Image: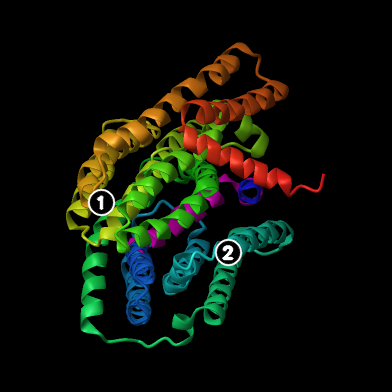
């Protein structure tokens, strides 16, 4: 997270607002096609984890073989789609600064290759996560961050066009990540060493049905992320994309703080369903929702309160609108730790049609509603307001769609998750917000308020947001950690 925030600062300063916005918006064209890859990734993760949960080695090999056939075909399909529809959109619909179309085309092509690599690597990523090899996952994440830190240095000293050079180096990192994931899987997992490109119809049919319905939800996901980026470009130009790019960088860095925590929990949720262990499944949904929310909020609250000061210290040039965009995207992000366990539990059941239709259809409303608001004269920040309202409504719908499928009580979910989360959210904000209003704005007071907000969330989470058993568990872990210290 620290490296990500630092590199974003230097990249923005080195590329400039216009080129930074251009990189974000051109890459978003390719990202629009990755909703298919995201759906395939969800399907591959679910089927590999489910097979492991059942302990069926033959089914595991069939799933891995089928996933390589499907992902290879998908990569070719996206290449064709990007080189036709994507190029047309780049040339005829995008607002590209004069004289930068040549570089924009190269950035686009690099993004296409990176997209194809990410699609082909999905089965390898899924195997590592399903086997819960989080050490390898952590190592790769840290290595990726270090390499991107090196890129920051290289683009500062390069004599080439900096945007072109930056996009090319990012692609090289993606290729290296793919190679390392592949080598690790070949070394550690039998199903990776003995891949048989299966033509088993029943396996293809089951995965195809699952993925087909997953496309609805993932199309909506791309719609309310990259689609909003394109809307802002069309209505306000690339400078606004730079402001949103800054907000998204902060959002992604903060999200990464808890994403890996939930990545470690997700395969356990699927395996519990596969083995009919509903009691532990409910425990994992409740606990992972709360713990990940508290972790996330311990960063969201201080950053949101002191967003202006933080961005001013972080960036040499803060794009107009970036402060407000950052606050709003962080508030939207708070839904993630609550929605992910429910999504994972639903995927574990394998019956996702109704869920995806309702969830995806509702989320897709973000783009047309945002378009109407902008057409009526709305300011750039209004698209985030639209996104926030619809996403919080969708979370309520998720509960009504999933709870009965996993035999989980909605009343218990409200009592064990939503009530403590709401109490912690409101109570922990009172003191740091009051200090922010009352104290003069300077770097010392900013530092004080940041620490105050973090400790406020942690203390309120421990005292008001956890059960007695959960507090005992935390105390036990703290004792175990302190016992290992050399002093």
Q: Which residue shows up at 68% across the image and 46% down it?
A: 481
Magenta segment: does it hold 58? no
Q: Is 60 in front, or is 365? A: 60
Q: Is residue 389 visible?
A: no
At mark 2, the secondary structure is helix
Classify mark 1: helix, strand or loop.
helix
Determine whether 319 is above or below 163 in the image: above
Q: How many marks?
A: 2
Relative horizontal placement of residue 156, taking residue 25 as reference (left or right): right
* Residue 87 picture location, percent across and down: 37, 66
Which region shows up in magenta? 9-35
Q: Nearer the viewer, mark 2 or mark 1?
A: 1
Q: Write the residue at 52% across / 32% down.
A: 323
Is the residue marked by circle 1 packed among few (<14), some (14-19), or many (20+) residues within 10 Å?
some
The C terminus lies in quadrant: top right
Task: Tell me, yes or no, whether the two marked residues, 2 and 1, touch with CB atoms within 8 Å.
Answer: no
Residue on which the image places disc 2: 170
Pick out the residue farthest to the left.
354
* Residue 402 x %, y %: 24, 48
**Magenta stretch: dominant SS?**
helix
Q: Position of residue 407 (x, y in %)?
A: 23, 48
**Residue 289, relative to residue 280: is it above or below?**
above
Task: Give the residue at mark 1.
Answer: 406
Q: How far from the left and from the top, in percent, is residue 150?
A: 70, 60
Neighbor class of circle 2 (other Cα within 10 Å; few <14, some 14-19, many 20+) is some
Marks 2 and 1 sit apart, C-alpha to C-alpha, by: 41 Å
Q: Residue at x 53, y 81 (%)?
A: 186
* Earlier sequence position, callout 2 versus callout 1: 2
Whether residue 73 is situated above or below residue 270 in the rendered picture = below
Question: For this rendering, which residue is in front, 253 or 130?
Answer: 130
Residue 413 left/right relative to 329: left
Query: Looking at this rendering, what residue extends furthest in the top direction?
Result: 438
């Amino acid at each position: 997270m620290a490296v990500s925030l630092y590199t974003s600062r230097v990249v923005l300063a080195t590329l400039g607002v216009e080129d930074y916005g251009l990189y974000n918006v051109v890459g978003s064209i390719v990202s629009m096609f990755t909703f298919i890859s995201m759906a395939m990734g969800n399907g591959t993760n679910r089927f590999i984890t489910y097979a492991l949960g059942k302990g069926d080695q033959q089914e595991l090999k069939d799933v891995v073989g089928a996933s390589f056939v499907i992902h290879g075909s998908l990569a070719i399909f996206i290449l064709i789609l990007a080189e036709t529809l994507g190029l047309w959109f780049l040339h005829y619909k995008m607002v590209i600064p004069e004289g930068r179309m040549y570089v924009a085309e190269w950035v686009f092509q690099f993004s296409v290759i990176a997209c194809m690599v990410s699609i082909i690597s999905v089965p390898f990523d899924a195997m590592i996560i399903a086997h819960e090899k989080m050490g390898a996952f952590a190592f790769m994440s840290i290595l990726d961050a270090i390499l991107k830190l090196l890129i920051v240095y290289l683009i500062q000293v390069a004599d080439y066009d900096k945007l072109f050079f930056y996009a090319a180096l990012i692609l090289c990192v993606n290729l290296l990540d793919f190679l390392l994931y592949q080598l690790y899987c070949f070394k550690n997992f039998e199903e990776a060493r003995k891949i048989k490109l299966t033509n088993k119809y029943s396996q293809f049919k089951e995965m195809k049905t699952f993925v087909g319905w997953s496309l609805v939800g993932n199309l909506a996901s791309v719609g309310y992320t990259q689609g909003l980026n394109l809307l802002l470009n069309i209505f306000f130009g690339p400078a606004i994309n730079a402001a949103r790019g800054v907000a998204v960088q902060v959002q992604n860095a903060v999200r990464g703080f808890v994403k890996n925590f939930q990545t470690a929990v997700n395969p356990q949720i699927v395996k519990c369903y596969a083995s009919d262990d509903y009691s532990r499944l409910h425990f994992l949904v409740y606990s992972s929702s709360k713990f990940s929310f508290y972790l996330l909020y311990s960063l969201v609250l201080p950053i949101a309160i002191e967003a202006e000061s933080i961005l001013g210290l972080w960036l040499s040039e803060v794009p107009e609108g970036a402060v407000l965009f950052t606050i709003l995207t962080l508030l939207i992000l708070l839904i993630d730790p609550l929605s992910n366990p429910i999504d994972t539990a639903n995927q574990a059941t394998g019956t996702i049609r109704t869920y995806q239709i309702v969830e995806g259809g509702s989320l897709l409303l973000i783009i047309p509603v945002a378009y109407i608001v902008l057409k009526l004269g709305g300011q750039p920040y209004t698209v985030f307001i639209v996104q926030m309202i619809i996403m919080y409504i969708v979370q309520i719908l998720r509960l009504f769609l999933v709870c009965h499928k996993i035999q989980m009580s909605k009343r218990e979910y409200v009592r064990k998750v939503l009530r403590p989360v709401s109490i912690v959210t409101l109570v922990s904000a009172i003191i740091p917000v009051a200090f922010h209003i009352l104290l003069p704005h300077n770097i010392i007071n900013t530092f004080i308020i940041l620490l105050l907000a973090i400790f406020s969330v942690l203390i309120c989470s421990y005292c008001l947001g956890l059960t007695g058993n959960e507090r005992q568990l935390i105390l036990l872990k703290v004792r175990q950690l302190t016992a290992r210290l050399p002093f």
